[in-house]
Amino acid sequence: MRWLLFALLPLAWGHQPARLVTDYDVENPYISYAVNGSFVTGDETFVVHLTYDRGFALPLELLTEKRRGLEGHRPMYAVVGPGLPPPTAEELAMLPAALDDGQGVFVDRNADAERLVVFESVMRRYYWSTGATALALDPGDYQVWVWSPEGTTGDFVLGLGVEEDFSGGFGGLFEDWGIYAY
């Protein structure tokens, strides 16, 4: 099943690319997105906002380009919102911000000794991946926090969502094509 997710990932990314400055509001959380960001100083926290009006199993994956110089770049992500488990003391200590009352959290530490490597065929790059995780979410407001616990710098891609929606064209996919494609 995992191979199917990776085989379909290029289609998911090709649809709704977004460049993340620090905050990004997902307009339709039921379709797929590839949210790109870059740690310039290493102390940034990027926040993606999602609102669900019904329960949803949200697939997520955090990627960093597999290339020399980025071996130690392992950003983390956390999903924060209602219905998620309360954080452990260790998770609370590593989060980049405090949780509001009633919020739970899922933390992906991106700490596997041997990282999964995937090839993304649209931008033709190899990436280290946290691996795809699907979280069962209740209706409500959620945030995905992405941060660099070691203060490393470099780019990342947060892949999330499922369904394709090509009604808006290619959503800016080719705007930065010259930067990424070779």
Image: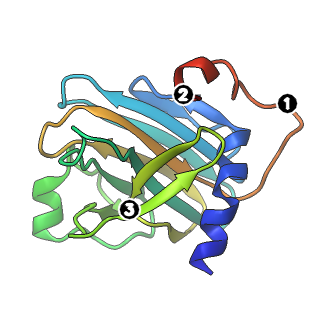
In the picture shown, does residue 62 fall above or below 48?
A: below
Q: Secondary structure at mark 2?
A: helix
Q: Which one is in front, 51 or 176?
A: 176
Residue matched to label 1: 169
Q: Quadrant of residue 94?
A: bottom left
Let me know if residue 56 appears in the view: no
| Quadrant containing the C terminus in the rendered view | top right
> How many residues crowd mark 3 within 10 Å: few (<14), some (14–19), many (20+)?
many
Q: Secondary structure at mark 3?
A: loop
Residue matched to label 2: 180
Q: Which one is in front, 79 or 151?
A: 151
Foreground label between 1 and 2: 2
In this rendering, would 173 be left or right of 181?
right
- What whole-number distance in Å separates the C-alpha atoms at marks 1 and 3? 29 Å
Residue matched to label 3: 130
In this rendering, would 170 be left or right of 143?
right
Q: Secondary structure at mark 1?
A: loop
Three-letter amino acid code at the position of disc 1: Gly
Task: State which tag comes first along the sequence, 1 or 2.
Answer: 1
Foreground label between 3 and 2: 2
Three-letter amino acid code at the position of disc 2: Tyr
Give coordinates of residue 138: x percent, y percent.
57, 67
